[in-house]
Image: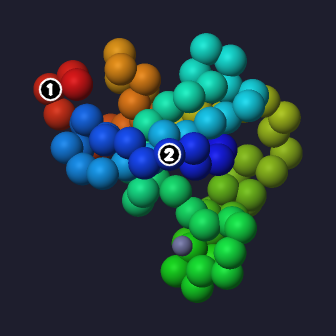
């Protein structure tokens, strides 16, 4: 995904980002909270640590699977906003 523009993240009532996923089909554009994202295009120590931790965890569990895997942590709202289930409040 790439960041397209700043955008209000309704599920958390905080500033977020409008995101574009060229392979997303009906969900090409979503809005997510910055804490759901990692920096890939610039050297960011915090994000590199987080990314390596995710690789250690997920490559070990899923490396031999070909299909798209949904771990059930995130959903999208009726407004097309990406939300972590722990952040979801009152179905917004
Ligand atoms: Zn970062």
The residue drawn where x is 17% and y is 33% is 89
Write down which quadrant ligand 1 falls in: bottom right
Displayed quadrant of residue 38: bottom right
Q: How packed is label 2: few (under 14 Cα within 10 Å), some, or many (20 or more)?
A: few
What residue does disc 2 label?
A: 5
Q: Which mark is residue 90?
A: 1
Q: Where does the C terminus fall, quadrant-wise?
A: top left
> Helix, strand or loop at disc 1?
loop
Residue at (14, 26) in percent of width and height: 90
* Location of residue 15 with respect to 7 vertically, above or below: below
Q: Residue at x 48, y 40 (%)?
A: 18
Query: In x, y percent, where is residue 50?
Result: 55, 72
Residue 72 in view, yes or no: no
Q: Quadrant of residue 23?
A: top right
Q: Give yes or no for contact between labels 1 and 2 (Cβ–Cβ under 8 Å).
A: no
- How far is mark 1 from mark 2, CA to CA? 26 Å
Depicted 64 relative to depicted 11: above or below: below
């Amino acid at each position: 995904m790439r960041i397209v523009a700043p955008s209000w993240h309704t599920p958390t009532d905080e500033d977020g980002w409008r995101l574009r996923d060229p392979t997303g089909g009906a969900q090409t554009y979503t809005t997510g909270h910055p804490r759901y994202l990692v920096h890939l295009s610039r050297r960011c120590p915090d994000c590199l640590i987080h990314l390596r931790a995710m690789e250690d965890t997920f490559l070990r569990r899923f490396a031999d699977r070909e299909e798209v895997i949904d771990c059930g942590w995130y959903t999208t709202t009726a407004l097309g906003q990406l939300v972590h289930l722990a952040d979801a409040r009152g179905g917004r």
